[in-house]
Image (cartoon, helix red, strand yellow):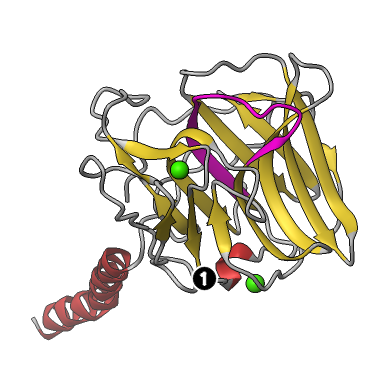
Amino acid sequence: MTSFFFSIIAAILFLLPVQCAGFFESYVAAIQPPAVSQGIGGIDQYTVLMIHGTGNDTSTSIVDSSYAGADSPHDFTASGDAQIDTSVAGPWEEDTGSILFDGVGDFLTALDSDDWYFANDDFVIDFRIRFDSFPALAAMNMVGQRESVGRIWRLFLSDTADATEYSWRYFNTWSSVKTIEVNRDIASISTGTWYHIAFVRSGNNFSFYQEGARLIAAVADDSTTDNITAAFTIGEFNSAAYFAGRIKEIRISKGTDRGWTGDTIQVPAGPYTQ
Ligand SMILES: [Ca+2]
Ligand SMILES: [Ca+2]
């Protein structure tokens, strides 16, 4: 009887830590951010910017839904006529607006932040975009920072000398030298159509994706991106390169390539969620 009693005590003492560990793990899992799902992800521990661009028609309140950045959520100021517009259907059925830029003096700004500085980290900039017009032998800027003529980074659509040919471009410039330069011609792009665009750094490879298809091939470059001290802008560059159209679901992911490394990627079926 005594040995039986001690066996019960021993069994309890053996199982107790296992039970406690299980409880502790459940507790920790409950308070940690949701795990990233490679391939699309959502608003997670890598997301340093998340602008859905939805809201009431004509609203100039541009909300950042990220929580993981050094300065999340970022405050944005809408300038010119940049505003939420609900007159055009979005890329999915449940859509409730996008940010409209009329191509003349419209842009968004936020303060400088380490969230815009990637150093050698993997990163992804992706968004939904619908052009109302295209630049003519010029550029329309999506995102970037400009400290001076020789210190910039920017992501933009460019019109080249061939009137039918546009390209997606990314520059990192330091001491007036383009230390990283990615130019990718676009086979086809139209006004009035929504596109998912992603720019990905995975290790030392830089890729543009349009509607899930990589443009040409990755560009290999082991350069470090620079820390630019300037406002972060969307829809313009140096009081020029104004964007004409609509944009939404602007996400910046830092410290991950989202698994977007192949020739094709899965285009998200709806807005990003936590
Ligand atoms: Ca305007
Ligand atoms: Ca900076």
- Give the x, y percent position of residue 29: 31, 64
Between 142 and 43, the one nearer to me in the picture: 142
Look at label 1 and name its amino acid.
Leu
Between 24 and 102, the one nearer to me in the picture: 102
Answer above or below: position of 99 versus 46.
above
Q: Is residue 267 visible?
A: yes
Q: Residue at x 72, y 56 (%)?
A: 153
Q: Regarding mark 1 in the picture, which secondary structure is present there?
A: loop
Q: Quadrant of the N terminus?
A: bottom left
Disc 1 crowd rating (10 Å Cα; few below 14, some 14-19, many 20+) is some
Between 76 and 214, the one nearer to me in the picture: 76
Q: Name the side, left or right, on which 23 lies relative to 231.
A: left
Report the magenta residues as a range. Answer: 124-140
Residue 139 part of the magenta segment: yes
Q: Is residue 224 visible?
A: no
Q: Which residue is mark 1?
A: 111
